[in-house]
Image (cartoon, rainbow, N blue to C red):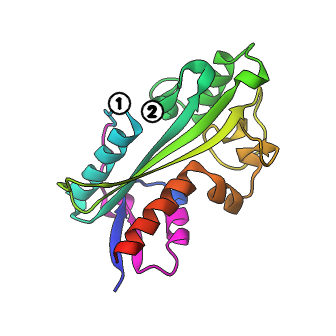
Amino acid sequence: MATRILLASGNPGKLREINTLLKGAAISVASQAEFGVPDVEETGLSFVENAIIKARNGAEHTDLPTIADDSGLEVDALAGAPGIYSARYAGSGASDADNLNKLLVELEGIEESARTARFQCVMVYLRGPNDPTPLICQGAWEGRILTQAQGQNGFGYDPVFYVPTHKCSAAELPDDEKNRLSHRGIALRALINQLTSQQ
């Protein structure tokens, strides 16, 4: 019988990505939306803390083992900003476009070679709400910030995140290629390797 795990996110894209990577493993992942789990305030000061807060919230509401991730963009010229505030860089309730525009304004006049950046993702697995030893996996995706948006695929900062190996923005990559390269894909594959080796 498959082990049931909760994903502490209502994002259908994330759920699809995880279940695709889990094909063949005796694990099935359900979205917190299925259980009516309320969102929790991300009060941590790091990606790890925020991921644990989300995972614990999911586990407390469902009594299921829970996966959660926290991710964001670090721009070197901005001393690592927007970082953990990536989703609310332009203020609470900001849209992807608002955040992206704020980033481009902050980087005006910064030359191409100094626009280095990376996406970071921390993925956490809790066996239950009081698990003292969560599994923690991390992935990073290096690139740099373009001066204007390119591409229609992806979300968030993808249209301005240039991928040097592919000479295009993250928003111009096909989904399967993005999943293979991305910070979330790297962290998730590491986590799945750990989970399946324990089965």
SS for tag 1? loop
Report how far apart the C-alphas of labels 2 and 1 lie in the structure. Answer: 7 Å
Within 10 angstroms of label 1, few (less than 14), some, or many (20 or more) residues?
few
Left/right of residue 28 with respect to residue 153 in the rendered view: left
Q: Nearer the viewer, residue 72 or 34?
A: 72
- In the orientation shown, which residue stands out farthest toward the bottom? 1
Q: Nearer the viewer, residue 66 or 116?
A: 116
The residue segment tinted magenta is 15-41
SS for tag 2? helix
Amino acid type, callout 2: Ile
Circles 2 and 1: CB distance less than 8 Å? Answer: yes
Q: Determine the residue positioned at 48% across, 23% down.
A: 91
Q: Determine the residue positioned at 77% across, 48% down.
A: 172
> Which residue lies under the disc numbered 2?
84
Rendered view: 139 above or below 196: above
The C terminus lies in quadrant: bottom left
- In the orientation shown, which residue stands out farthest toward the right? 167
Q: Position of residue 166 (x, y in %)?
A: 79, 49
Is residue 106 shown to the viewer in this render?
yes
Residue 144 image-quadrant placement: top right
Left/right of residue 174 with respect to residue 41 in the rendered view: right
The N terminus lies in quadrant: bottom left
Q: Position of residue 112 (x, y in %)?
A: 78, 24
> Which residue lies under the disc numbered 1?
45
Q: Determine the residue positioned at 41% across, 73% down.
A: 196
Left/right of residue 74 with respect to residue 172 in the rendered view: left
Amino acid type, callout 1: Leu
Is residue 93 shown to the viewer in this render?
no
Q: Position of residue 119 (x, y in %)?
A: 58, 40
